[in-house]
Amino acid sequence: MSNKSMNNQTVNSKAKAHMQGEHAAAIAELGWFGAHKYLLLRRAVQFGLLGLFALGPLLGIWLFKGNLSASLLLDTIPFADPLVSLQMLASGHIPELSLLIGAALIVLFYALAGGRVFCSWVCPVNLVTDAASWLRRKLNLPRSSELPRNLRYYLLALVLLLPLLTGNLIWEWINPVPLVYRAVLFGSLSGVWILAAIFLLDLFIAERAWCGHLCPTGALFGLIGKWSPIKIVASKASACDNCMDCFAVCPERQVLKPALKGQNPVITSPDCTQCGRCIDVCAQRVFRYQTRFTATQAQLSTGDSTDCQSPSTTSPIRQHIAPKAENDQ
């Protein structure tokens, strides 16, 4: 069989795969695991952390004590949510030294790994919002009007203002992150209605409303990881075949446009959760994890081939994604 015939068969099989179901082209090219590897890794991390916290209450093995708001590893190493520490300071209370050290360790980690890595790899509420997003796609619900993305920063300011005015950590009464842990570890169902409300909000009212537009915790972690060296890079943007699969699954799809259409292939936006789904579903292997420094050096040394394209030869994704991404900003 000639190379041309084999290439035609490959193209036809990919086109057929696109018609067969969600991410079918990536599955045909990369295999089922290859098209879901980062999704599976994220779920393993999320459930693994929950399991480590559950060992104490369920089996008496106290590797971790506490929850994601404040915890102690092996009765020695503290970890703490930086937002909790900031609220305590705003309320006029000086946190214990262990809480400050724990918050500093978390800030250091996410400043290096990427702040919103917490949102997609650690936060248990991500399971709820991802489920709502998946169901939206399965039900083929129309895209709804979206809330302003900077609204989460106003809510972050409000979360810090309320302790200043009241002396209480008001946000922690309804923070859905510890609510999940309390529900799973201790059977406390008092806050489940908040999780149900988030699910219904994301499903029927505004797509990705909670994580993408409202969550103050995500807003803070986005600021913490703004200059993180680890990024997702569209290292092969010119190979994009305009399938739009990455656009369909990305929880912050507006971050894709600059990397695919602009001069810099690095996704530098602090909104990116670095979930890796764009890497998973891309049959053309356009995206990859990389450090911003090596990506920049590679671009300077070899040049981005897409920079030299004339408008008539620009990659189709660059023409097609622009108006859609503009609407998401």
Image (spheres, helix red, strand yellow):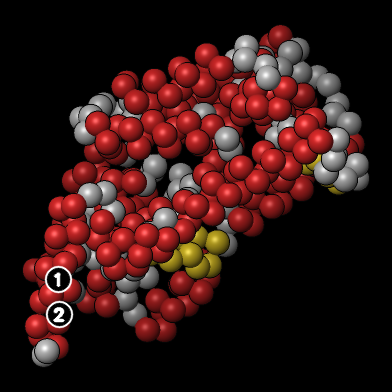
User: Residue 284: where, in percent of width, then height?
Assistant: 28, 68
Total labels: the figure holds: 2
Residue under the image location 69 percent in, 23 percent down: 182
User: Residue 208: where, in percent of width, then height?
Assistant: 38, 32
User: Residue 129: where, in percent of width, then height?
Assistant: 44, 32
Q: Residues within 10 Å of mark 1 (few under 14, many from 20)?
A: few
Q: Residue furthest front?
A: 59
- The answer to whether 195 is drawn above or below residue 224 in the figure is above
Q: Quadrant of the C terminus?
A: top left
Horizontal side, residue 308 vs residue 214: left or right: left
Q: Are marks 1 and 2 in contact (CB under 8 Å)?
A: yes
Residue under the image location 43 percent in, 37 percent down: 130
Which image quadrant is residue 156 in? top right
- The answer to whether 176 is drawn above or below residue 61 in the figure is above
Query: Dot 2 corresponds to which residue?
Result: 7
Considering the numbered disc 1 on the image, is that residue within a helix, a strand or a loop?
A: helix
Residue under the image location 47 percent in, 51 percent down: 39
Considering the numbered disc 2 on the image, is that residue within a helix, a strand or a loop?
A: helix
Query: Dot 1 corresponds to which residue?
Result: 11
Q: Quadrant of the N terminus?
A: bottom left
Residue under the image location 48 percent in, 47 percent down: 273
Q: Quick one: 328 or 311, which is closer to the camera? A: 328
Q: Amino acid at mark 1?
A: Val
User: Residue 326: where, in percent of width, then height?
Assistant: 25, 43
Q: Amino acid at mark 2?
A: Asn
Q: Marks 1/2: CA distance?
A: 6 Å
